[in-house]
């Protein structure tokens, strides 16, 4: 059984249909990429899994449990961490306090301290900036903090929405390298990423979303080699 199964999900914003029968799965140990053009429905897919968008059809199963109608706060408690597009930090709080906000559902103080150290090891820059106000960080540092905050919930699945958006190439390298390291530590990743080439390079499997529908799926390497994907998303 897959860790996450999305089964023929429909979702709308008012009269605008954003998702049309979307189905995908994430297995234990995988990085799964979801690629597509702007407005294809990638962000909506993650927001639906997180409970922030209520689907009008289909169902979402996580760890064998139907979470289609589950509240967002309870979905976090079940083990889904979500680093949203735009980072959505608390800009007037310190880096340290932002990380603690990621652990707001937890009461295991020793475990929280252990995970703080883990985040600092993954992102040494965040350790250096831990007393700094989050809103004064650079874009790359804010993205590292957003990922670190999601990890503080000790997720069974980490969902990331455009983690490399707006970052310089060197910082993009850092983010993608860290995602591989996080996955190697046992955390499955569902990755939405505009940089399709980099996403497919690290993905075990991937899906292509167009106008709210899955139109192609395969391993990361299969989609990298696809002429259709190369023309549409890789600039070849």
Image (cartoon, grey):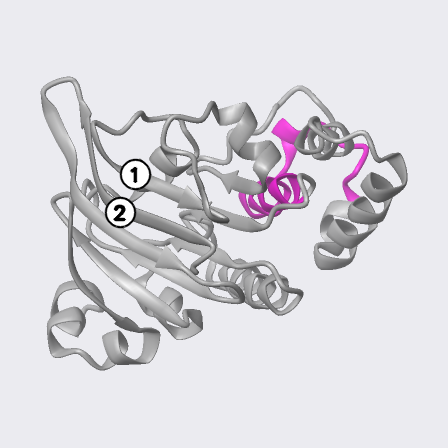
> What element does badge 2 sit on?
strand
Q: Is residue 27 above or below residue 213?
A: below
Question: Percent position (x, y) of residue 208?
Answer: 21, 59
Q: Is residue 140 within the magenta segment?
A: yes
Instruction: Confirm or deny contact between disc 1 and disc 2 (CB under 8 A).
Output: yes
Q: Residue 219, labelled with which disc?
A: none
Q: Residue 59, labelled with which disc?
A: 1
- The residue tagged 2 is 7
Which residue is more in the foreground, 30 or 208? 30
Residue range highlighted in magenta: 128-151
Within-10-Å neighbours for mark 2: few <14, some 14–19, many 20+: some
Q: How many marks?
A: 2
Extreme-right residue of the structure: 110
**Residue positioned 55% across, 61% down in the render:** 179
Question: Percent position (x, y) of residue 234?
Answer: 22, 68
The C terminus appears in which quarter of the rendering?
bottom left
Q: Is residue 203 above or below residue 38?
A: below
228 with respect to 110 (left or right): left
């Amino acid at each position: 059984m897959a860790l996450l199964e999305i089964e023929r999900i429909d979702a709308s914003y008012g009269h605008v249909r954003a998702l049309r029968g979307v189905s995908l799965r994430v297995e234990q140990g995988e990085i799964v990429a979801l690629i597509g053009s702007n407005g294809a429905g990638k962000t909506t897919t993650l927001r639906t899994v997180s409970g922030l968008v209520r689907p009008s059809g289909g169902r979402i199963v996580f760890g064998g449990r139907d979470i289609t109608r589950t509240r967002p706060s309870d979905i976090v408690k079940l083990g889904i961490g979500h680093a949203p597009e735009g980072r959505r930090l608390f800009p007037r709080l310190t880096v340290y306090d932002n990380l603690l906000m990621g652990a707001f559902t937890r009461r295991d103080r020793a475990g929280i301290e252990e995970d703080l150290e883990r985040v600092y090891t993954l992102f040494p820059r965040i350790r250096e900036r831990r007393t700094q106000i989050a809103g004064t960080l650079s874009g790359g540092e804010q993205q590292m903090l957003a990922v670190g905050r999601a990890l503080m919930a000790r997720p069974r699945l980490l969902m990331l929405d455009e983690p490399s958006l707006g970052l310089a190439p060197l910082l993009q390298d850092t983010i993608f390298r860290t995602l591989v390291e996080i996955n190697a530590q046992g955390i499955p990743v569902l990755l939405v990423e505009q940089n399709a080439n980099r996403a497919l390079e690290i993905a075990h499997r991937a899906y292509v979303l167009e106008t709210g529908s899955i139109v192609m799926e395969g391993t990361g390497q299969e989609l990298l080699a696809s002429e259709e994907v190369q023309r549409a998303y890789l600039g070849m």
